[in-house]
Image (cartoon, rainbow, N blue to C red):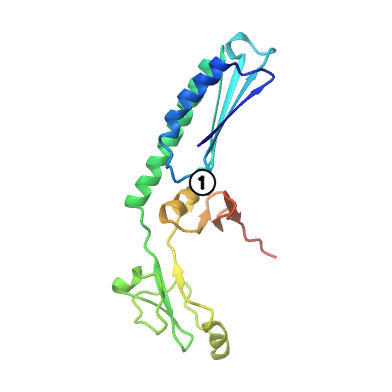
Amino acid sequence: MQIIIKGKQMEVMPRLRQHIERKAHKLTRLISPRNSTARLQITIAEEHTRSAQDRYTVQILLMGTSPTLRSEVSAPNATVAFDQALGKLLAQFCRQKDRLTTARRHQRLPIRVLALARSGQLSVLGGEEASVVTAAREGAEEVEDLPVPTSLSEEQNETVWARIREIRSLPTKPMSDKEAILQMEALGLPFYPFVNEATNSVNVMYRLEKGGYGLLIPALE
C-alpha cells in the first residue's frame, strides 16, 4: 500500500514522518496484498489562528478500498492528532470489514430466474433451478405469480429472443447508496439495483472500470 504524507503550511519533520510510517503499517497488514490500488494519504496542517488545544489537524484518507474511508482529528500536537485519527480510521475499517464478512455469510439474497418461452410468455423457474445463473431457453412450470405478468407479441418475441440470455428478479428493500455498495460487493456483482431510501425510487449502483462507483438515477420525461 502506498503511503503519502503531506504537510499543509508546515514541514513534516523526519521524526514525525518515521512515527507516521511505523504506525501506518498496522493498517497495511490488514489490507489484502491483492489490492494494488490502496493508498493512505495523511495531511498534517498547522493553524496558527487556532487555540492551543486544536492547533494541529490531521486528515487521513484511505483510498482504493470500498468505500473510501476518512478521519480527521485536531489536537495540541501533530503526533497526538495522527494517533487519534489513525485509531478512528482503523475502527471504521474494521467495522466495514465485519459488515462485508457478515453480508457474505448471512445475506445471500435469492435470485429468481425467469424463463422466456418461444410463445413470449415469462415464467418462474422452480426448485433448485432458481439458483442457476443461466436462464433456460424453454418455458418452465410457474411456481409463483410475477409482480407484473407480461407477454410479448410474436414479432417482438422473435426480435428480442436472440439477445436475451437471462432475466433476474432481485428482492431488495429501501437502503442508502452506501448500503447498496456493501450488498454489491458482498454478492460480487458489477452492478446492483436497489430502492433508494432517500428518494423512494429505483436506482442502480455500478462499479467503474477506472475504480470507484457510479449511481444511475432514472428521470421521467
Residue sitting at 61 percent across and 9 percent down?
52
Q: Quadrant of the C terminus?
A: bottom right
Where is 82 relative to 65, above or below? above
Give the percent coordinates (x, y) of residue 218. 62, 61
Residue sitting at 39 percent across and 43 percent down?
99
Give the percent coordinates (x, y) of residue 111. 39, 65
Quarter of the view holding residue 70: top right
Q: Which element carries disc 1, helix, strand or loop? A: helix
- 94 vs 176, nearest the viewer: 94
Residue sitting at 32 percent across and 50 percent down?
105
- 191 vs 127, nearest the viewer: 191
Residue sitting at 42 percent across and 82 percent down?
137
Residue 15 appears in the figure: yes
Q: Residues within 10 Å of mark 1 (few under 14, many from 20)?
A: few
Name the kind of residue labelled 1 in the image: Lys
Residue picked out by circle 1: 178
Query: For the image shown, how many numbered marks are present on the structure?
Result: 1
Residue 148 lies left or right of residue 53; in this view the side is: left
Residue 75 appears in the figure: no
Where is 60 relative to 97, above or below? above
Give the percent coordinates (x, y) of residue 131. 34, 68
